[in-house]
Amino acid sequence: AVLFTQPAEEKAQLLQNTEYQELMVESSFMYLSLDLPTAPLYKDEKEQLIIPQVPLFSILAKFNGATEKEYKTYKENFLKRFQLTRLPPYLIFCIKRFTKNNFFVEKNPTIVNFPIT
């Protein structure tokens, strides 16, 4: 979380510290897990729930090598960036639709638009 709140020059200074050094790990994968944005609770004028839509390319932005995602564990926070260097012959997407909290599991109904061409 420290890197999100700091200006660029302070971020560069922190990266000099061994605790904040960037580490690159290359790994193969069987599928790509894609995170859906949280569904807004908008209603239209007839009080019907609107099902949000998101293009596939916007959820694939996680793998552009520049987008950072924060991960929190019980003892530390860290940022990860993902970049695809080579694509396999077949690509399997696992779209994360379910989130759980202390009481129940909730399904995100967002529609993912896949391009035809």
Image (spheres, helix red, strand yellow):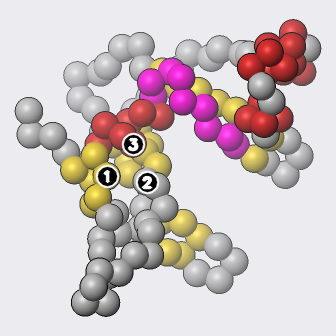
Q: Is residue 51 left or right of residue 38?
A: left
Q: Residue furthest bottom?
A: 47
Q: Residue at horizontal 78%, vertical 36%?
A: 5
How far, Cα to Cα, is label 3 from label 1? 8 Å
Circle 1/circle 2 CB separation < 8 Å = yes
First in sequence, mark 1 or 2: give its number. Answer: 2
Nearer mark to the viewer, of 1 and 2: 1
7 and 24: which is toward the camera: 7
Badge 1 density bin: few <14, some 14–19, many ≥20, Cα 10 Å: some
Magenta stretch mostly in which secondary structure? Answer: strand
Query: Tag 1's secondary structure?
Result: strand
Residue 17 appears anywhere in the view: yes
Query: Tag 3's secondary structure?
Result: helix
Mark 1 = which residue? 54
Is 77 inside the magenta-drawn segment?
no
Circle 3/circle 2 CB separation < 8 Å = yes
Circle 3/circle 1 CB separation < 8 Å = yes
Q: Quadrant of residue 59?
A: top left
Q: Residue at horizontal 60%, vertical 32%?
A: 68
Residues drawn in magenta: 63-71
First in sequence, mark 3 or 2: give its number. Answer: 2
Q: Is residue 87 left or right of residue 29?
A: left
Residue 21 appears anywhere in the view: no
Q: Residue furthest left?
A: 117
